């Protein structure tokens, strides 16, 4: 992931506490890395992307936590 793409994701994450709902982490960079199986834009797995629309707010926060851990671990 480029540093610009990661910055967009982190900026979106910073707004979660201010939102009335948990926003999608999608930043319109929709490419799945074949090696990791994760979206190169938002670090979600295909399963997480597919479940997003039916997930509870609590589940969405859990997904955000996982993808932020992945983003911070990515060099």
Image (cartoon, rainbow, N blue to C red):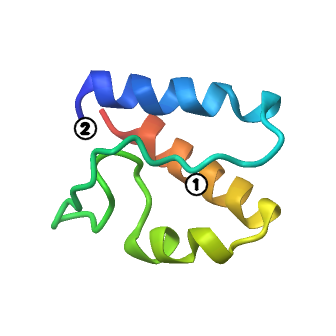
- The residue lying at 62 percent from left, 50 percent from top is 64
> Left or right: where does residue 40 sit relative to residue 9?
left
Expressed as whole percent of the image width and height from the top left, the position of residue 67 reads 51, 50
Mark 1 neighbour density, 10 Å: few (under 14) some (14–19) many (20 or more)? few
Measuring 52% from the left and 46% from the top, which residue is drawn there? Answer: 25
Contact, CB < 8 Å: mark 1 with mark 2?
no
Percent position of residue 38, x then y: 33, 61
Residue 2 horizontal side relative to residue 49, left or right: left
Judged from the image, the secondary structure of the residue bearing numbered disc 2 is: loop
Residue nearest the viewer, comparing 47 with 75: 47
For the C terminus, the image quarter is top left
Q: Residues within 10 Å of mark 2 (few under 14, many from 20)?
A: some
* Residue 9 point in image, percent of width and height: 46, 33
Q: Is residue 20 above or below residue 35?
A: above
Which residue carries the number 2 mark? Answer: 1
Query: Where does label 1 land, which residue?
Result: 66
- Residue at 81 percent across and 62 percent down: it is 58
Q: Quadrant of residue 5?
A: top left
Q: Could you tell me how far apart the alpha carbons at marks 1 and 2 are, in whole angstroms?
A: 16 Å
**Secondary element type, mark 1:** helix
User: As rendered, which of 38 and 12 lies closer to the eye?
Assistant: 12
Identify the residue at horizontal 32%, vertical 57% (top origin): 39
| Near-viewer residue (63 or 21) | 21
């Amino acid at each position: 992931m480029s540093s610009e793409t990661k910055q967009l994701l982190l900026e979106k994450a910073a707004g979660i506490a201010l939102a009335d709902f948990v926003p999608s982490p999608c930043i319109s960079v929709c490419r799945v890395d074949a090696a990791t199986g994760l979206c190169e834009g938002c670090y979600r797995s295909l399963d997480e992307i597919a479940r997003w629309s039916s997930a509870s707010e609590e589940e969405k926060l859990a997904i955000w936590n996982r993808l932020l851990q992945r983003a911070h671990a990515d060099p």
